[in-house]
Amino acid sequence: MSQSPDSDTGETRARVLAEALPFMQAYENKTVVVKYGGHAMGDTELGQAFARDIALLKQSGVNPIVVHGGGPQIGKMLAQMGIESRFEGGLRVTDEETVKIVEMVLAGSINKEIVRLINAEGEWAIGLCGKDGNMVFAEKANKTVVDPDSNIERVLDLGFVGEPVEVDRTLLDLLARSEMIPVIAPVAPGRDGATYNINADTFAGAIAGALEASRLLFLTDVPGVLDKSGELIKELSVSEAKNLIRNGTISGGMIPKVETCIEAIERGVEGVVILNGKTRHSVLLELLTEHGAGTLIVR
Ligand SMILES: Nc1ncnc2c1ncn2[C@@H]1O[C@H](COP(=O)(O)OP(=O)(O)O)[C@@H](O)[C@H]1O
Ligand SMILES: CC(=O)N[C@@H](CCC(=O)OP(=O)(O)O)C(=O)O
């Protein structure tokens, strides 16, 4: 597909569809996990374009699963409540009060808005979090960071930040059979009774791994992984990615994203891509065009 799927002449549409057809057939009955980041959620129009892409995938016979974030939206709500956001190693330090707000924003307002947008495209989306159908259980995250100056490793105490340790695919399999599109918020219970806030990238990786997804796409607010001079890196091997984290080229929220890509590849997910969710129809452009978009992480 050489043109945007927005092109509106009948002839262009027919050509675009003809070019996209072999790609659509290749993804038929395949699971594609799309992580929709908080920074990629722009205005309503952009949200509608995203929802249209997801609906179109479903209508083409693909099994799309949306895992969403909402970091900036949580930050805004916390600020309104007079609570300052603090991040360590790209993860939100989450105390008991914060985790309640995280659940409210992610599994409440953001989740339901995405469901509404997809349903408005004629599909049946269903909003969930890790708690629903015993889908995901988490444990307190045990995360370490290496100080770039001293090179000393430090264990972080992030409070109620969790890591997914058990994923049960029963509910997701059921929904796939009933033609529903799951939209999942990255909140999960622990066997200890606590509720955990999980980085949405990590959560999406765990879901994609458990489902042996064909593709895992991360929609963010940058074209992909950028080098020191701000140029897009089109393809990145696992060892190159680790180096870029070590030397500080990859920082902040890009760290858990790239770490998740590496883990997902090691778990057998076929293709992992980081791309710009602010480019309209980037999901379709990635999946249904020869050249794709963003940074492809390879073994
Ligand atoms: N090397 C890099 N290439 C691209 N983005 C980077 C890089 N290092 C850090 N970042 C930051 O990571 C951000 C994306 O991560 P994050 O803010 O967590 O997005 P999301 O909310 O989509 O998960 C970018 O907006 C950018 O500021
Ligand atoms: C532990 C942790 O950091 N959780 C994230 C969950 C949301 C998220 O990951 O949203 P984005 O994808 O938009 O960044 C947070 O509280 O912000």
Image (tube, rainbow, N blue to C red):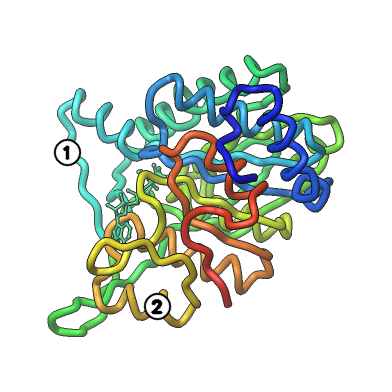
Indicate whether 215 appears above or below 283: below
Instruction: Report which quarter residue 119 is drawn in.
Output: top right
* Dot in front, 1 or 2: 2
Percent x, y of residue 250? 30, 66
Percent x, y of residue 284? 61, 41
Q: Amino acid at mark 1?
A: Glu
Asked if the residue under mark 2 is in contact with the one under mark 1, i.e. CB atoms within 8 Å, the reply is no
Front residue of this view, candidates 258 and 43: 43
Q: Where is mark 1, residue-wise?
A: 84
Percent x, y of residue 172? 74, 42
Indicate whether 283 appears above or below 203: above
Q: Amino acid at mark 2?
A: Lys
Query: Dividing the image into four equal quarters, which quarter contains ligand 2?
Result: top left
* Circle number at residue 242: 2
Which residue is the extreme one toward the front? 11
Instruction: Report which quarter residue 183 is drawn in.
Output: top right
Indicate whether 185 appears above or below 225: above
Residue drawn at x 64%, y 50% as measured from the top left: 289
Question: What is the distance, in whole Å, between disc 1 and disc 2 at their CAs?
Answer: 31 Å
